[in-house]
Image (cartoon, rainbow, N blue to C red):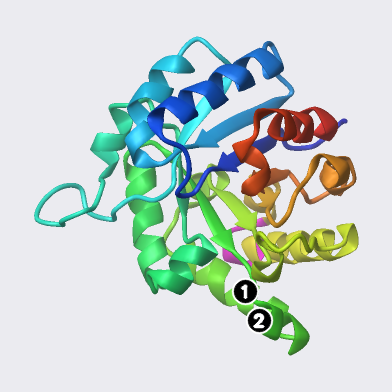
Amino acid sequence: MNKERKLIIAGNWKMNKTVAEALTLVADLKRELANLKEVDIVVAPPYTALSEVSKCILDSNLRLAAQNMSENNFGAYTGEICAGMLKEFSTRYVILGHSERRQYQKETDALIARKAAAVHAAALKPIVCVGETLAEREGQLTEKVLETQVTGSLAGLTKEQAAETIVAYEPVWAIGTGKTATTQQAQDAHAFIRGVLTRMFDEATARKVRIQYGGSVKPGNARELMGQPDVDGALVGGASLEARSFADIIKNSI
């Protein structure tokens, strides 16, 4: 598949996998995906497994992501994890603003923007999640929600930082529900997001930004989704918890 931007497919494990289970999964992925270079492959285990997973994938084509990060560098922030701690484990990416954190932890666009700035300051790459709820889509508010979230969550970034940011479009109504946006719905949303990025920065910057799709991505729909001109990868939830399904999504995307 000849894409303008290199595909990036990340597995967000959420609050799943003990250290032992995590090591089994990445060992299987290493076997399944050995020598595959056409796609940037990322796994995001829970914090407790980062250290051991980091050691396991050191000699592989898998890269490590954290599922969240504090906007602060150190200090009296009980329960938080900062960039310096993540870098100890060769973490490359940090997922920010996932809809579950927006919903359950009440994270705002302004907070996510501060986190994105902290991620870039540490020479890591943020994966910034945006997406509308079912009520918002049915109310014809998709574009308004996406514009608000993208402009708010990426506020303050330089053009250079924006180009190194991954945006993940995750329609909330498709996460873990088995419902998937049609390829046209996904492409329309991604093209709209790229338009917002063009207005925020410029066209050259917007063309460099990789925009992932997330929301019930499966081996069976991966090829069609990844074939869309503005879909540059996937942020995979449930299907990334099993080596074969995650590997098949990646293989079917090429």
SS class of the residue under badge 1?
helix
Residue carrying label 2: 144
Which amino acid is tagged 2?
Answer: Lys
Q: On residue 147, which mark appears?
A: 1
Q: Position of residue 21 (x, y in %)?
A: 48, 29
Is 115 drawn above or below residue 94 in the view shown? below
Magenta region, residue range:
198-202
Task: Determine the residue positioned at 52% across, 55% down.
Answer: 128
Image side of residue 152 versus residue 212, left or right: left
Name the foreground residue: 218 vs 10: 218
Q: How dense is the environment of label 1, judged by Cα within 10 Å: few (below 14), some, or many (20 and up)?
A: some
Q: How dense is the environment of label 2, judged by Cα within 10 Å: few (below 14), some, or many (20 and up)?
A: few
Is 80 drawn above or below residue 42 in the view shown? below
Q: Position of residue 32 (x, y in %)?
A: 70, 17
Contact between marks 1 and 2 (CB within 8 A): the answer is yes
Q: Quadrant of residue 124?
A: top left
SS class of the residue under badge 2?
helix
